[in-house]
């Protein structure tokens, strides 16, 4: 397959297609106040989370900030509350500028979510670029996400409609279930009881999926998929009696240190595209990243191969993923790095180099989501 800056879409099982490279738009939380440093030891990590009264958490592709006791600021319509922006590192407007730079650079795929709290900036950037005549709506592929508190089927469409209102767009190209773990619906995005324990909700992934199918049928989402689903959870959907639309994609952590060979093979067999989050190994913010796994971009093999092609380790890591058919959504709000991450279509890795990089797999996640390990549908206990 020849991949170019102008043409690097891969087909989805529903007849649509997805660009192999997209811009991630999650925002890092502010450090300071009662910052919670997650110890690398798992039991300590859990204790630290439970003990904390102000915690920063990571959601699959984003940083999620939680204020205990439902002490959020912001809107609460549709049962989704919004923490204050000042709790994030990213200044207002940064995401807007980044998405505009990305579109000018050639990116046509943007990955976002309600819980990144900057979806309005993503929408504005897309609309401004359309108004400028730089792109048409159909050139852009936008992926949005259904949050855990919105799994009950009757909430799915109103939640997507709210996202469309925030974006000021008529449809999303892809709408995915962000995590297979339902939380109690309501105002709090991270509902907790008086003891600080997360309040989960009965999870019925098949029922949620049927509501997702209805969103596709209504034209609100061109394609529908999932995120952080393990094999068992994917099979639950694939084997659902009366399944109307298969998930076209599964967004999961994927990079040279976590190559997901088994899940990738399973998904290939079922025409499910893997979208790899944290393709550069995350921001290594110890408040939410398992930093016991070494920094990906310092890897000697990636750097040596990069030297050969006058490329950075980041570019090699991204090229590796797209060459194996994994969609990548590197997050950057830095103009130079946004451009750097797009320069991966003017070189290719040899079979030997691909194998060398595959051999770097450590099978260790940067993003473990241990605080939700007691959820009945916590996805990462299974082998894959
Ligand atoms: P920044 O936004 O300042 O560029 P991932 O997508 O794996 O989660 O990685 C995102 C992190 O990597 C962010 O902290 C981002 O910071 C940084 N990053 C993005 N692109 C590059 C690059 N080309 N080289 C080094 N770091 C990068």
Image (cartoon, rainbow, N blue to C red):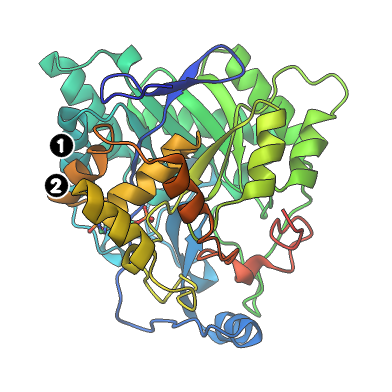
Q: Quadrant of residue 150?
A: top right
Name the residue tied to disc 1. Answer: 101
At 66% from the left and 80% from the top, the residue drawn is 195
Name above or below for residue 149 compared with residue 84. Answer: above
Give the farthest residue toward the right.
Answer: 241
Residue 22 x, y percent position in the rendering = 35, 36
Question: Residue at the spot x=49%, y=79% of the render?
Answer: 292
Is residue 305 something that shows in the picture?
yes
> Mark 2: is the Cβ under 8 angstroms from ligand 1?
no
Return the x and y of residue 80 as percentages of the image width and height.
Answer: 50, 47
Quarter-of-image position of residue 27? bottom left
Give left or right: position of 352 versus 26.
Answer: right
Q: Quadrant of residue 301?
A: bottom left
Position in image of residue 282 (x %, y %): 39, 61
The vertical placement of 92 against 67, above or below, is above
Q: Secondary structure at mark 2?
A: helix
Quadrant holding the N terminus: top left
- Asked whether, in this view, residue 113 is left or right of residue 214, the answer is left
- Residue 34, image x, y percentages: 38, 84
Task: Tell me which residue sits at (77%, 58%) in the image.
Answer: 382
Who is closer to the viewer here, 320 or 88? 320
> Closer to the camera, 350 or 156?
350
Instruction: State the residue at coordinates (43%, 62%).
Output: 72
Q: For mark 2, does the 10 Å Cα neighbourhood hold few (<14), some (14 to 19), or many (20 or more) residues? A: some
Ligand 1 is found in which quarter of the picture? bottom left
**Disc 1 + disc 2, Cβ < 8 Å:** yes
Q: Where does label 2 land, which residue?
A: 335
């Amino acid at each position: 397959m020849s991949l170019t800056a102008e043409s690097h879409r891969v087909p989805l099982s529903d007849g649509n297609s997805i660009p192999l490279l997209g811009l991630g738009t999650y925002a890092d939380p502010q450090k300071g106040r009662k910052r919670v440093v997650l110890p690398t030891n798992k039991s300590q990590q859990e204790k630290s989370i439970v003990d904390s009264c102000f915690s920063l958490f990571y959601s699959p592709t984003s940083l999620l900030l939680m204020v205990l006791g439902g002490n959020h600021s912001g809107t609460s319509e549709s049962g989704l509350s919004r923490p204050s922006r000042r709790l994030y590192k990213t200044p207002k407007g940064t995401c807007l500028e980044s998405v505009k730079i990305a579109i000018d650079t050639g990116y046509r795929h943007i990955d976002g979510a309600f819980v990144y709290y900057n979806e309005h900036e993503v929408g504005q950037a897309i609309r401004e670029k359309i108004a400028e005549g730089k792109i048409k709506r159909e050139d852009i592929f936008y992926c949005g996400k259904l949050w855990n508190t919105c799994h009950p089927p009757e909430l799915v469409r109103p939640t997507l409609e709210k996202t469309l209102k925030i974006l000021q767009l008529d449809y999303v190209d892809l709408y995915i279930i962000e995590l297979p773990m339902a939380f109690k619906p309501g105002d709090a995005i991270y509902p907790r009881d008086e003891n600080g324990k997360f309040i989960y909700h009965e999870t019925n992934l098949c029922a949620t999926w049927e509501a997702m199918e209805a969103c596709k049928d209504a034209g609100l989402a061109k394609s529908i998929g999932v995120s952080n689903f393990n094999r068992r959870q994917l099979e639950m959907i694939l084997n659902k009696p009366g399944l109307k639309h298969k998930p076209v994609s599964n967004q999961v952590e994927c990079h040279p240190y976590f190559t997901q060979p088994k899940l990738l093979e399973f998904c290939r067999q079922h025409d499910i595209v893997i979208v790899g989050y944290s393709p550069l190994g995350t921001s290594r913010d110890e408040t939410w990243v398992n930093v016991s796994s070494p920094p990906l971009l310092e890897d000697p093999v990636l750097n040596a191969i990069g030297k050969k092609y006058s490329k950075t380790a980041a570019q090699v890591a991204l090229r590796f993923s797209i060459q194996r058919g994994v969609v990548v959504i590197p997050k950057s709000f830095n103009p130079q790095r946004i451009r750097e991450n797009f320069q991966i279509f003017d070189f290719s890795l040899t079979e030997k180099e691909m194998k060398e990089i595959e051999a770097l797999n450590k099978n260790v996640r940067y993003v473990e989501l241990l605080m939700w390990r007691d959820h009945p549908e916590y996805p990462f206990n299974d082998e894959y």
